[in-house]
Amino acid sequence: SMLKNVLESFVTICWAFFVLFVQVTHYSILTLFTWLAFFSWSWTNEAVAPIYYLFLLPWLATPCMISIQYFLYQKYVKPATPSQQSYAFLNMIVPVRIYLIRNKEDAFNYFILSILNICTSTLQAFLFLAIALFNLPLEQDQRLVSSSIGHFFTFWLEVCLPLYLLLTGLVFLYSLMFWYLVISPN
């Protein structure tokens, strides 16, 4: 019916927008911290301290996620033509081409593993950034009274960690809702 198609389209657009929003926010935060760690030193004409290379670690999660998503796409979708193969890298944002998988159980496995990979990659990058912040020298991050933990690291754990957990949890929850409301019935 027309109402069902409109509802499915609305849910699909909302889900894709939310997943894309979380990914863009995540990569914006990574880019901001990387720029602050590296390019701010060029303004002061100082050399980059080796400790600041730790701020590149969060970017390590992205190639890992891309390669896992690529192999998931190859295993479950099994693209036959170059045009189908071209969707493999779009798969790193949202799982695509699920309708090409005829077995519903395989399609569900592909979808859930893809979403878990995306969420795990986001949390892995968060963990790497927390490690970089924890290792900031005393001059850059003042320590709390009677503690060896810095203010910025504490802020990162108390404010950003719950936000990251909330957003990745919502991505997973919305993805399950998307599966049961839109993909599974079709």
Image (tube, rainbow, N blue to C red):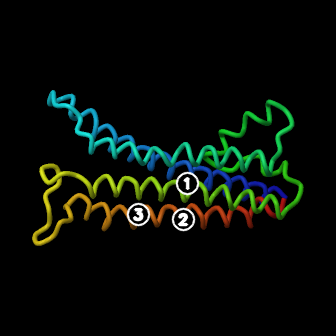
Tell me the kind of residue under disc 2. Answer: Leu
Above or below for 144 versus 94: below
**Quadrant of the rendered image containing residue 42:** top left
Sequence order check, earlier mark of 3 and 2: 3
Is residue 124 shown left or right of residue 96? left
Q: Amino acid at mark 1?
A: Phe
Q: Report which quarter residue 111 is drawn in.
A: bottom right
Q: Residue at x 30, y 68 (%)?
A: 158
Label 3 to label 2, Cα distance in Å?
Answer: 10 Å
Numbered tag placed on residue 18 in the rendering: 1
Q: Residues within 10 Å of mark 1 (few under 14, many from 20)?
A: some
Left or right: 7, with 106 as reference point: left
Q: Position of residue 58 (x, y in %)?
A: 42, 48
Mark 3: secondary structure: helix
Disc 3 target residue: 163
Would you call the spot at circle 2 few (<14 residues within 10 Å), some (14-19), or many (20 or more)? some
Crowd around label 3: few <14 · some 14–19 · many ≥20 (10 Å): few
Q: Earlier in the sequence, mark 1 or mark 2?
A: 1
Does residue 151 lie above or below 92 as drawn? below
Along the line of sight, the residue nearer the viewer: 27 or 131: 131
Helix, strand or loop status at disc 2: helix
- Residue that extends furthest to the bottom in the rendered view of this protein: 146
> Looking at the picture, which amino acid does disc 3 mark?
Leu
Compare residues 185 and 6 and report the one nearer the observer. 185
Residue appearing at x 41%, y 44% in the figure: 28
Residue located beneath label 2 in the image? 170
